[in-house]
Structures are given as structure tokens and as C-alpha cells.
Image (cartoon, rainbow, N blue to C red):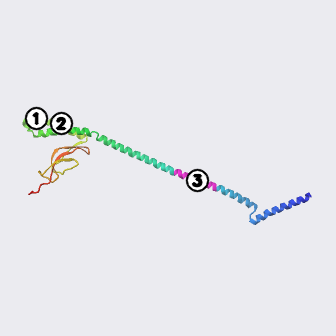
């Protein structure tokens, strides 16, 4: 009885081996090759995961580089804007300091006009009236020259209108017109009062009389 069961088990085992061998032979793959294929398949999966991880890392690195360039550009722009603002501030400050004495200069012009008027009147006076007057007049001329030099040192200069030259609206102020005198229409006939400028800005225009268009004969 026992011997019979063992024989049956042996037959079943041989049948099982025969079945597996048959399947292996049917597929043309040996059991060893199957194990190798399974191992290779598992390895391929790990390679895909590693490649995917490396790809994600490259994308992250590239994103960080782009962000760095954007921040760098913003920083450079901020520095440039700050530098431009500083230059504008320094330019405005220098401009204000340069012309800070403009109001005071206008007040001084009244004094300068007084000296000019006194000199013109003195030149009309006969110097032979007395030695004292001659000495006084020379002293007045000296003070007037000193005042003019002081004004020039502060950037304040006299603006003269030359007779016979064209009227210049930038520096002249026409208070009247006349048909008398030589020169072309619109030219300066006479200067009534000199003008002044502070550097390249007009403090006061020179007051002038200009030549008007002549009246045709017979009218």
C-alpha cells in the first residue's frame, strides 16, 4: 500500500516536471533564461526611475538659473536707477547753488544803475569846473569798475545793446520805435539802460529803442 503511494507521487512529480519542461520548450526559453529576463526587467525599471529623477533635477536647476538671472537683472536695474537719481540730485543741487544769489544780484543792480547814472552825468560836466570835481569823478569811476569786477566774479555781467545791430529778443527789451537814425528796420537805434545776466540766465534785459519801418514818400 505504502509502496504504491510512493510510486504514484513519483509519477506525479515526473508529470509536473514534464509539464514545466514542455512549457519551457514551447516558449523556447529555459528556466535559467527566465530568471535572467526577470532580473533584467527589474533593472530596467530602476534605470527609468533614476533617469526620471535626473531629468527633474535638471529642470529644477534650470529654473533656479532663470530665477537668478531675473533677480540679477532687477538688481542691476535698481542700481542703475539709483545712480541716475543721484546724478539728477547732484545736478539740481549744483544748479540751485550756482544761481542761489539771483535775488540778491537783482537788488545790487539798483546800486550799479546809480553809479552808471552818476558817471554819465559827470561826463557831461566840464572838468574845468574845479579840481575837486575831477578828483571826485575819478574816484567814482574807480568804485564803479570795482563793483563791475565784483559782479563779474559772481557770474554777473553787463549786457549792452550795440547801436546798429539787430534787436535780440533774448537780451533786449524794446520800449519804443523810431524812424530816425541809420540802420535797418528792427536794428537798435539807442540804448536807454544796460542789462545784466547771471551766467547764462537773463537778470534784466537792456532797454532799447529800435528802428521802425520808414514811411514811404508821398504819404
| Disc 3: CA contacts within 10 A as few (<14), some (14-19) or many (>=20) | few
- Labels 2 & 3 near each other (Cβ < 8 A): no
SS under mark 3: helix
Alpha carbon separation for disc pair 2 and 3? 89 Å
Left or right, 61 with reference to 183? right
Most distant residue in the right direction? 1
List x then y, in percent, for residue 13. Answer: 83, 60
Choose the circle earlier in sequence order: 2 or 3: 3
The x, y position of residue 129, in whole percent, is: 7, 36
Q: Are marks 1 and 2 in contact (CB under 8 Å)?
A: no
Front-lying residue, 146 or 170: 170
Identify the residue at image location x=79%, y=63%.
21
- Closer to the N terminus: mark 3 or mark 1? 3
User: Residue 143: which disc?
Assistant: 2
Q: Main secondary structure of the magenta part?
A: helix
The residue indicated by pointer 3 is 56
Is residue 36 found left or right of 7 in the rendered image?
left
Q: Which residue is mark 1?
A: 133
Which label sits in the foreground, 2 or 3? 3
Which residues are drawn in magenta? 48-65
**Callout 2: SS:** helix
Amino acid at each position: 500500500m505504502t509502496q504504491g503511494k510512493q510510486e504514484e507521487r513519483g509519477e506525479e512529480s515526473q508529470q509536473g516536471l514534464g509539464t514545466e519542461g514542455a512549457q519551457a520548450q514551447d516558449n523556447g526559453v529555459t528556466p535559467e533564461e527566465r530568471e535572467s529576463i526577470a532580473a533584467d526587467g527589474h533593472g530596467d525599471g530602476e534605470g527609468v526611475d533614476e533617469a526620471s529623477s535626473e531629468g527633474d533635477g535638471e529642470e529644477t536647476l534650470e529654473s533656479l538659473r532663470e530665477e537668478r538671472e531675473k533677480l540679477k537683472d532687477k538688481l542691476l536695474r535698481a542700481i542703475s536707477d539709483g545712480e541716475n537719481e543721484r546724478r539728477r540730485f547732484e545736478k539740481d543741487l549744483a544748479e540751485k547753488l550756482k544761481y542761489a544769489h539771483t535775488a540778491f544780484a537783482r537788488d545790487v543792480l539798483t546800486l550799479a544803475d546809480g553809479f552808471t547814472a552818476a558817471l554819465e552825468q559827470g561826463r557831461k560836466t566840464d572838468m574845468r569846473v574845479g579840481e575837486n570835481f575831477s578828483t571826485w569823478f575819478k574816484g567814482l569811476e574807480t568804485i564803479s569798475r570795482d563793483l563791475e569786477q565784483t559782479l563779474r566774479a559772481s557770474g554777473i555781467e553787463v549786457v549792452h545793446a550795440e547801436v546798429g545791430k539787430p534787436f535780440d529778443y533774448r537780451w533786449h527789451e524794446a520800449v519804443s520805435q523810431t524812424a530816425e537814425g541809420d540802420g535797418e528796420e528792427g536794428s537798435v537805434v539807442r540804448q536807454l539802460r544796460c542789462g545784466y545776466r547771471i551766467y547764462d540766465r537773463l537778470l534784466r534785459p537792456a532797454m532799447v529803442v529800435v528802428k521802425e519801418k520808414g514811411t514811404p514818400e508821398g504819404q
